[in-house]
Amino acid sequence: MKTLLLLTLMASAIQASDRKAAIDQLVQPVIDSGTAPAVVVAVIENGKPQIFGYGKGAGGGAPDGSTIFEIGSVTKTFTTLALAQMVQRKLVALDDPIRKYLPEGAVPAASEGQTEIRLIDLATQHSGLPRLPNNMHPKDPADPYADYTPKLLYEFLAEHGLALPAKPDFLYSNLGMGLLGHALSLRYGKSYEQMIVDLVADPLKMQDTRVTLSGDQQKRFIQGYDAEGDPVHVWNLDALAGAGALRSDAADLVTYLQAQMDPPASLKAAIDLAHTEQHKIGALGAIALAWIIKPDGKTYLHDGGTAGFSTYVSFNATTKTGVVVLVNFGGTLMDQLGAQVEKILAGETAQPLPVHRAITLDSKMLEEYPGSYEMIPGVRLAITREGDKLFVQLPRQPKFHLYAEAKDKLFLRIVDATITFDRNDQGQITGCVLHQNGRDLKGKRVE
């Protein structure tokens, strides 16, 4: 019996060492290349966590489990757990229309015979509401949600209406989840932050998951950076706090995922409700209350991003594994890291992430790339030059900075994508190829 126990402990120690080595091999090149200033990765196996920090933390040393990040849209899972708690307490019902919990007269009722948007429609991203309201005009673009007030929210809803589409599809909406958090806080009678503290953070003893940080927490709050590597302003959310206002650290998020896999008795009914599949959503799998359920039907995940931070959390209650990735860099790096860490926990070999190192091109070379490239009929990719910088833009999308990795090979930092260029026998650029998500899309230069 003692021998068996000793062997088990030895196996666990070897596995833990292997996990660290594999995660080091995955993450360290990202740090060394300058792709991200800091990364914290936490893994849970058999209920036991390990936390690894890379790069430079808030105090100058390596980040750790107490380093605080903005967690962006991972906040949405806290909003829906608060919803599930309030359902269990009979304060609300999933099928209640959202208008029931807004100030009387703030938003007109839907026309007779129309179904109104319900709490469950907002919680499952099936409300039909757009990603963002069209009356969102921030005074400070660096802090875009800060001055979007309840008054502006009601004005938008009064114009848009609260009628539920006849066949609502999955449409990811920060507006919808923000509206849900706002209405729930009105029903609860406290601020959004205090509602989350009362219903989620305090019951789970998560002391660093807050909107407003104390003096000590501010010291542990790491600076965020954009795709250019420039420091960015923190995001503050008013009426739409439920979509992404929370800050947290790896230690708290580990606690949060452990509760998802092994709920305490006081939260079990609410967590079970939050995990219940509500809709299939195509190739993504399915959605519960905010949580995305992968096609395997067992892995739940959510990610989040702000201007200078990105977060990924996932768990599998069957295998008792969980992943947290925190990055102080805007973009999609967290999803790539999260997927590979999941592979490591499954005993598979992680694929190295593409690491790009920018070089400087001379002015003559820079001038060769700007132009219009037709990727599919009617859709053109525009490359422009501003000083010594190149930018790429697709129709109805923002423009993004392009970096040179080599002659005729440019890359983006905001997403994992590269653009290579084709030339004719005279050395003139005739087209490009966009490489993204394992696909190659060729475009012909038309201007």
Image: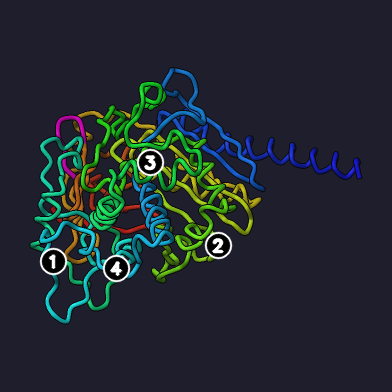
Which one is closest to the eye, mark 1 or mark 4? 4
Q: Amino acid at mark 1?
A: Gly
- Direction from residue 353 to residue 147 in the image, left or right: left
Q: Quadrant of residue 173?
A: bottom left
Q: Which residue is mark 4?
A: 96
- Direction from residue 283 to residue 424 in the image, left or right: left
Between discs 1 and 4, the one toward the N terminus: 4
Q: Which residue is mark 3?
A: 71
- Determine if residue 446 is in view: yes
Between discs 2 and 3, the one toward the N terminus: 3
Q: Which residue is mark 2?
A: 298
In the image, the segment drawn in magenta is 383-389
Residues at marks 3 and 4 touching, judged by CB atoms closer than 8 Å: no
Q: Secondary structure at mark 1?
A: loop
Q: Is residue 337 above or below residue 55?
A: below
Question: Residues under labels 2 and 3: Cα distance?
Answer: 23 Å
Q: Residue at x 54, y 39 (%)?
A: 42
Residues at marks 2 and 1 touching, judged by CB atoms closer than 8 Å: no
Q: Residues within 10 Å of mark 3 (few under 14, many from 20)?
A: many
Question: Residues under labels 4 and 2: Cα distance?
Answer: 29 Å
Between discs 4 and 2, the one toward the N terminus: 4
Q: Quadrant of residue 121?
A: bottom left
Residue 261: % across, % down? 57, 53
Q: Amino acid at mark 3?
A: Ile
Residue 289: % across, % down? 40, 61
Residue 362: % across, % down? 24, 28
Question: Residues under labels 1 and 4: Cα distance?
Answer: 16 Å
Q: Is residue 13 above or below residue 174?
A: above
